[in-house]
Image (spheres, rainbow, N blue to C red):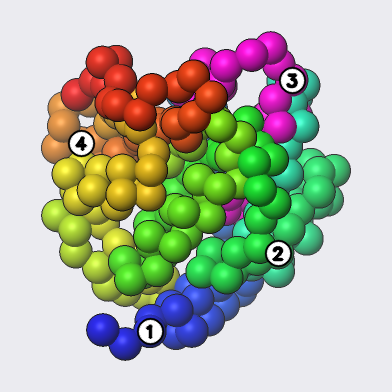
Amino acid sequence: MPDQAPTTSRRTLGHYDRHAQAFWDGTRDHDVSQNREALLRHIAGEPPFTLLDFGCGPGRDLIAFTALGHCVIGLDGSAEFCAMARTHSGCEVWQQDFVALDLPDAHFDGVFANASLFHVPAPHLPAVLRALYATLKPGGVLFASNPRGEDEAGWQGERYGVYHSLDGWRAYVTAAGFVEIEHYYRPAGQPRHRQPWLATVWRRAGQGWPAHRSSTASA
């Protein structure tokens, strides 16, 4: 399969750069507290935690995590998003393409990937997940929320996405070494056909954390 990264990154990030203010206006009040809480409650130890907001956009969740007292760094590929996130949150924000990451080893207690990893083309996803695994401390937690589908991929306008099934997503993340903690669908309280988002929570094994699936995974 040919390398998709240059086209998918260039077009998708170009869209976000051009529509950064509209994206902020449209998403700044979205309530994803359920997702932030899912990450935080599974991190061992006492807060504050060191977190990476992977695909931080204009900074909504950077603001929320900082208000809770955590040390959070943002990462996004869009230059406009990074500039806005720094202004809105006051946090350190790294501009990096998802398929060309340069992350510190064993640095973060948690990685929050809310509506971001689905932009990674499937051929590049194993390397991206391995990079996120390596940047977590042993026992650290990855939260990921993606629009769900049947493992199809393609363009919606100028944005590229992969729409993973639960089984397909599990195969990628477990192959990277992660252990599943739980999963759920959003928005809460709706019938499944009205829950387009799949949220999953994972742990990096090591230092006393077992390398087997948790019994707390939920449908």
Q: Position of residue 165 (x, y in %)?
A: 19, 48
Cα distance, mark 1 to mark 3? 40 Å
Residue where numbered disc 3 is placed:
48
The range drawn in magenta is: 38-66
- Which amino acid lies under the numbered mark 2 shown in the image of this protein? Gln
| Comes first in the chain, label 4 or label 3 | 3
Q: Would residue 89 be found to the left or right of residue 139 on screen?
A: right
- Which amino acid lies under the numbered mark 4 shown in the image of this protein? Arg
**Disc 2 packing (10 Å; few <14; some 14–19; many ≥20):** some
Q: Quadrant of the C terminus?
A: top left
Residue where numbered disc 4 is placed:
194
Q: Nearer the viewer, mark 4 or mark 1?
A: 1
Q: Residue furthest top?
A: 46
Residue drawn at 57 percent across, 53 percent down: 55
Cα distance, mark 4 to mark 2? 34 Å
Q: Position of residue 154 (x, y in %)?
A: 27, 72
Magenta segment includes 56: yes
Residue where numbered disc 2 is placed:
95
- Which amino acid lies under the numbered mark 1 shown in the image of this protein? Asp
Cα distance, mark 2 to mark 3? 24 Å
| Comes first in the chain, label 4 or label 1 | 1
Residue 204 visible, this angle: yes
- The one nearer the camera, 22 or 197, is 197
| Comes first in the chain, label 1 or label 3 | 1
Q: Position of residue 191 (x, y in %)?
A: 16, 27
Residue 146 visible, this angle: no
Q: Is label 1 in contact with label 2 (beta carbons under 8 Å)?
A: no
Q: Which quadrant holds residue 88? A: top right
Residue where numbered disc 1 is placed:
3
Q: Residue furthest front?
A: 207
- The one nearer the camera, 143 or 206, is 206
